[in-house]
Image (cartoon, grey):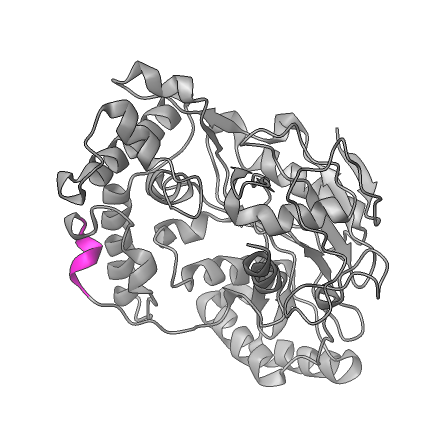
Amino acid sequence: MLTWRRSRRRAPDPVRDVPGVPDVSGVPGVPGVPDVSGVPGVPGFLRAPEVPPVDVAAAEDYLRLFHAENPGAGVLRERLREVRQEIARSGTYTHTPGELIFGARVAWRNSGRCIGRLYWRSLRVRDRRHVTTAEGVAVECVNHLRDAAPSRRIRPTITVFPQDRPGAPGPRIWNEQLIRYAGYAMEDGSVVGDPRYTGFTSMLRELGWPGGPGSPFDVLPLAVSMGDGRPLLSTIPGDAVLEVPLSHPTHPWFEQLGLRWHAVPVISNMCLEIGGICYRAAPFNGWYMGTEIGARNLADTDRYDLMPLIARRMGLDTESDRSLWRDYALVELNRAVLHSFERAGVTMTDHHTESRHFLMHLEREEKEGRVCPADWTWIVPPMSASATPVFHRYYEDRLLSPNFVHHPDSLGRALGRWAATES
């Protein structure tokens, strides 16, 4: 079940407070540290932005694309006239269900940082534009988590909430992903949990979240706001959090480390932009590539930084870089991730397979006469780079529309600045 908690400033609790978690009530003169005293429950820099009228040219460009790739969609000229009139009257327009579904899929097709776009046509679109409360958004986010992984087989899914309208910004989900783990900063400078989220964790605690049990894998609550309204915090029911305990195919001690990771990566802080319209709340997921967990989340020195621990358990010489102990440890950590997901029957791909699939996608797009934008630094996997085929060529990195974007005033960037300040 969902547990609701309207955010509120809380009094210090010497029992629950984690030592070293900073007070984020506002530090005058320190850039990037929010002052939450101006708007009850809402840090000033997180207030909803002003929404400008839709760019008519952007709307027309998208409608021409939609009709060009969907010949049975009707008469383009009539639809253009309808949209122009609606924008002139209200400053925006409303996508038809077909326009929304196609736009969300093409946004994935155009995402230059995603290696898994071969499957863009399979994206399931959950149209939830009728949901107008923070409670409703939270419920549908939980339903998304359940719908995206039936019987542990993960399906690419997006849930689209109401769009921004002039004078009425749509809902916003503060979390970077629907499932992420808390990071508790300790007095000695260490972190229990995920160091990436120490700032976000302290902010949620300031807004009323009491914190979890204090384990390295406490699931953060959802934070949802409507316009400038007070943010709603809600816990995520355990049955909606599919997690995989990590073990190793040949090292029995690995399972004793007590590691796990969530199985459905639902990005929730990017705007879905279609034809000049911004859907700020549009959480979407594919499935994990093993290296995202094994070579980044669990291995990066500013995340869980597990390679030294694993190297010691393997008995490796960590005194010299020339022993390549990091490389050995990294491979075994990634073997554990792939092995564990396969054993649990949860969808996951590996970086060699996905690299080949991306080049198949690239070839298909070129045959269709379309540009396939790709950012080399994101497409090339974070381990064994030159052993994959995507390493050995260049790509055209172009921003196309529709797309998933971070706006300069987006929550993700603002919270990132806060986290950097708090670290």
- Residue at 78 percent across and 52 percent down: it is 231
Quarter of the image for the N terminus: give it. Answer: top right
Say which of 6 and 315 sits in front. Answer: 315
Q: Which residues are magenta?
A: 388-393
Say which of 86 and 214 sits in front. Answer: 214
Please determine whether, in this image, residue 190 is positioned above or below residue 64.
above
Was residue 392 drawn as part of the magenta stretch in this picture?
yes
Q: Is residue 125 visible?
A: no
| Residue 204 percent location from the top left of the image | 71, 47
Please determine whether, in this image, residue 413 is positioned above or below residue 267.
below
- Residue at 45 percent across and 58 percent down: it is 108
| Residue 126 percent location from the top left of the image | 62, 48
Q: Is the stretch drawn in magenta largely helix, strand or loop? A: helix
| Residue 187 percent location from the top left of the image | 59, 41
Seen from this angle, which residue lies furthest front?
Answer: 188
- Residue at 66 percent across and 45 percent down: it is 21
Left or right of 373: which side holds 30?
Answer: right
- Residue at 59 percent across and 56 percent down: it is 422
Left or right of 204: which side holds 266?
Answer: left
Say which of 350 and 48 sits in front. Answer: 48
Quarter of the image for the C terminus: give it. Answer: bottom right
Left or right of 277: which side holds 367?
Answer: left
Seen from this angle, which residue lies furthest top?
Answer: 252
Q: Is residue 87 visible?
A: yes
Left or right of 103: which side holds 69?
Answer: left
Was residue 164 drawn as part of the magenta stretch in this picture?
no
